[in-house]
Structures are given as structure tokens and as C-alpha cells.
Amino acid sequence: MDSRRKEFERCCRAASSHERRSTNEQTLLRHLQEGKQCPRTSSPSVSDTISVARCVAAAKPLRRAILDRGFCHLLAQRATATSGYDPSLLHGVSYKVEDNDADCPARVVQPVPPDEPSVLCFNESLAFEPVASCDGLSGGAEHAGRRARRGGRGGGGGAAREAERGGGDGAEDNQVDRLSKLPDDVLLNIVERLDIADAAQTTILSRRWKQIPALLSKIVIKVASFQPKHEGRKLTSDDIVRANTNVLQATRSILEKRAASPHTIHLLRMQFYLGDESIFIGQTVANTIATHKVASVEFTILTKVRTNFTNNDLLTHGRQFMSFLGSCPNTFGGLARLTLENLRLGESDFPKIFSICKQLEVLCLYHCDMGIESLLEVEHSQLSELVIGRSVLIKRVDLKWVPKLTVLKFNMFRSQDDPFCLGYVPLLQTVSIINTGFSWHKMLKISELLGETAISNLHLNFKSEKIWVKPEGRRQLLPVLHKLRLVNLINISEECDLTWIMFILQGAPTLKELRILVRDHLCEMVTGEQRKKYAFSEEKDKGLEWEPSASDFKHHNLAELRIYGRFEAEEKIVRFARNVMEAAVNLEDIKLYKSPVCENCKHMLQEWTLKEKSLLSYKLRKGMLSSLVRIQFPSLGEIFTWPNYWS
């Protein structure tokens, strides 16, 4: 093995080690502050090897960013535009060659053959997994393995050996890799999809990459990027201080580099722990807001105790947050989004939060309250989205005056009354409610809950337990549902009959799409004696009796019905789907999916068999006069694009 080969392997091992981020936080911060190149990949003697090693150092994070759907969409737009973007910049040149005689397999650069210029090119959907190399991005592991095997049979071995020696087309211009040749906006779009630790690593790739932090329009700094792996142990106070200190230093480093930058920060998103260091983070952000063009600032504030917290923990967190708020009023006055967790505040604290956070557009509260059966009153001129999650001690949220509110999400309520009261919310469009219904829960009437609003999107998640919505007549529902376009009914128990769902169609004449998920999700359900102890309902569809107002009821706007489930209750699902087919005279598509899975039950993931498809299609169409409805059985892969309302 010659010296070039040995040097190559050494650099790749060094880069791989760097990729695993085995260095401590201070090394990363030093790269942030100084922008130095990694000394182990900067040998001047083998420039081609250096380029490979540099790209390998950031390969995995860059691959994830490039495969992000948002970037794929951007690439598709650029590929069809006339702005000078060259799609050939994203084609492949490298693959692995396994060397069984060596302890470590070697990576050998293979230029794209002139007679096959498009073999490894990306299409608009970036179907191939890219791999960073000295001359750009390759088509991915599948092509790599195939070309490697072909090379092993003599079909490309000569070219591989030539590339290894530094020859071939890929070595003619190895001072600047193709990834770095991408247009500025495309390159920035990739890096902005990385977390701050991975983005910091890209600064060692070249002089051009070193300047990227000063150009970023989106800066996301998360405390998780600076936390060591704890292998399940609880965080200590020292862990919190160390993590917050690293966030503070990274924030100062990146923002100081932008002191003279004319570029606007469109989004500054911060995640950190609530603690004494929070004040210094807030002051640093306040200085940035005062001296830079910052369009939007977001804070997610975590607490040291995130589960199994006591009342004393909640009270302590509440006092710490109010102290933080009082110390940094200018910072909170410029926030567009605020996420808080595990706080118990005083009765006057929420009005103070709303008065200081004047620019707040999104507020997310998880396990936040003011004590048992507390009332949260909301008056805010700019708030457009409110999320109340697991704040079970809040008896009711009174939205008295929120003129710009468009989205309301409510996760879990324990009150026997309506969980919220809608006052002046003229722009409300989306309402999402997730709740586990107990035997003592009151059944909610949508007409009373929504008051005088007319929403367009309704999402209800029943957590595979009691249905807590009361069917109503068309006359009661029409004032609040006459603009409804989309309905998601999630986690309906397999024990429940589905006929009651038809009341929504009857009260929502403009409904275009209806989605339902029928399953008993055992990973989340309580079973056995615990059900009696906590008063779970044994009759999950009690009180759902419903009869249509007219036997010949027809719906003229529903175009698509989606049903997700394990189809253990196939007879109920078929009967419901046929009812919809008879009522919805302009229905175009019925899409049937197998049940989605979570991390704990992913071994139960299933796909449709040909026999199942044929049998279900027959049962749905049997005796139906019209056969214009398309019955489809899409792959479950699509379901994971719709995650927000599953849990």
C-alpha cells in the first residue's frame, strides 16, 4: 500500500472520528469562535485526500439536510428556473471499494464516466442517498455497490485505480469540491437545516464554508446539541449549568460574528434550560435584537425535572421563570414564539406574561397551571396560535379577546365542564382536541363549544377510549361548521360503531376531506385492574345514538375519505364507508391504510396483500349503483407525513 493510500485512510479515519463528535463541547466551541480547520485533515501534500476527508467530516448531517423534503422542493424549483443554477453540480462521483486484505476498507474516488453522465445524477426528488466526496455527491449506496461490483469484475477497476492514484476527471479541479460550488442560496439552505453543532463542523471544510455562519438567515441553537450522552442517568445541576454555558458561548460566538453583517436573521430559535444562566442567554439575545435585523425570535425553555415532578418542583420552576422574565423584559418583548413546561404560576403571572410579550404569536404551555381548578384568561392582540398540553389542573381556558388567533390545540382536560370558552376570536380556523375520556367526562357539544366561530379544520383524538363528542342535528351544527373543509377523527376504539360520524357530514355541507383512524393502541391504553381504579369507561360509544334528519340525506362536496386502521373491525368500517359512498354523491377517492405504528409496536407494521385488497374492494362496491369512486390502498409510508395529530 503506497503512501497516498495510507494518507487517505488516515484522513478518513480522522474525519469519521470528527463526524462522531467524540470531541468535547469546548473543542466545538473553539471551532465556532476561531473557525479553525481541523489540524488532522489539513496536510498540504495530498489535496484530493483533504477534500474527501473534509466532506466525510460532515457527510451524515449534510445528507440528512439534503434529503429533507423542504430542500428537495427548493431544488425542484431551482432546477426549473432560469437563474443560472446548474443541476449537474449535484451528481455523483464516488463509492466504496472493499479491500479484504486491509484492516480498514478503502474509499476510492470514481469520476462519473463521460459516456454515462446521468447514471448517478439526482432527479428532482433526490431519490438517491447522497454521499459527500471530493467532486460532489454520489448517487448513493445502491449505485455504489453495483458499480463497485462491476469494478471488481473489471468493468471499472482501471478507472478506480486511476482515481486512487489521483488521476481521472475528478482530480483535475480538486481544490474546490462540487458541494462548495453550489449557489449561495442552495448551500445556505442546506446548512440552515443542520443543528448548530453540525453547522459549526462545516466551517472547517474550506474558507468559503467558514463564512457561512455570518450569512445564515436561520439560526437554531438547541441545548441538546451540547449535552453529553447520559446513558439513561438523570441530569444533575452541573449538567444543566454546563449545557446552558455551552449554549451561551455558542450564542455569543455566532452572533458576534454577525456584528457587521448586513444580512437579516429571519429566525433565531433558542432551546435551553431554565436556570441562573438563562438570564445571560436572554441578555445576549436582547443585544442581538437591538443591534441586528431579527425578524423572529423563538424560545423553548426546558426544566431540569421533566417527568415525575412534584408540586414543589412546579412552584420552584414558576418562581425561576418569573425572575427570568423580570430580568429580560426587552428579550421577551421581542419573542414571536414561547414554549414553557412544568410551571406553577400565581394568578397575576399570566397577565404579566401577556403584557410583557407584546409581539408573541405562538404560545405553547405544557404542564403549566395556577393550581387546582385554575382559570386561564387570555387577552392578547398578536397571538395567532395557542397550545395547551397536559395542563390538567386548568379548569377552563377563557379566550376573552384574541383577535388574531387562528389555531387552538388542547391536549387533555380533566374538568367536567367545557375545556375552553371562545370569546372574540374572529379568525379562528383550526381546533384540535386530544383527550382520554373517563366514565365521568361530560360529552361535549360542538355547537356549544365553538360558540359563534366558523372553523375550517377540526381534529379530535379519542386515545382509543370513550367518545366524548355528542352527535347533534344539522340545525345546531350549521352555524359553526358551515365552513368546515377538513376533519380528522383519530384513535377511535375498535369497539365503537362508526355510524355516529355521519352527523358531521350532515352539519358540514362544505366538507372536502374526512380522515378517520380506527384502532386500539395498546401501547398507550390502560388495561386490567387499573381501568377500574382510574374510572375508565367500559362503554366507549355510550350516548352516540344518532339518526339522520332525512333518510335521503346527500352531501355534495366531500371528495376524499381516508380510513386508517388494523381492520379488526372490518364489518364496521365497511358499513361506514358504504354509508359515506351513498351520501356523498361527488366522492372521488376512498383511501384505505393499514394502522400506523409507534416506536414500541413497529414490529406490527403491515402492508396490504392482493387478497385483502380484492376482498375489501368487492365488499365496498357490492350492490352500489355508482362505480366512479376510486378505491385505493396506499402504502403506510405516507402516514408518517401526518404526525401532528396521532399522539
Image (spheres, helix red, strand yellow):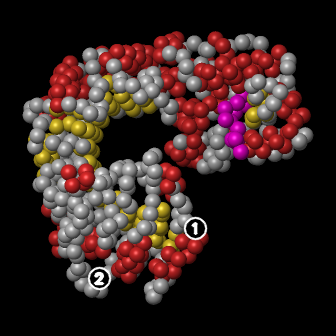
Q: Position of residue 348 (x, y in %)?
A: 9, 32
Q: Is residue 551 left or right of residue 72?
A: left
Residues tagged 2 and 1 counted as in contact (Cβ below 8 A): no
Q: Residue at x 70, y 19 (%)?
A: 11
As for residue 399 lying within the magenta part, the answer is no
Question: In this picture, is 510 found above or below 148?
Answer: below
Q: Is disc 1 placed on a helix, strand or loop?
A: loop
Residue under label 2:
553
Q: Who comes first in sequence, dot 2 or dot 1? A: 2
Q: Is residue 344 left or right of residue 560?
A: left
Q: Residue at x 55, y 65 (%)?
A: 608
| Residue position marked by numbered label 1 in the rendering | 609
Residue in the foreground of this view, choosing between 624 and 76: 624
* Residue at 22% over, 76% down: 546
Q: Say which quadrant the N terminus sits in.
A: top right
Would residue 267 appear left or right of 91 to someone viewing this image?
left
Q: How many marks?
A: 2
Residue in the image at 15% along x and 42% along y = 393
Q: Is residue 108 visible?
A: yes
Q: Amino acid at mark 1?
A: Thr
Q: Judge left or right: residue 60 versus residue 642.
A: right
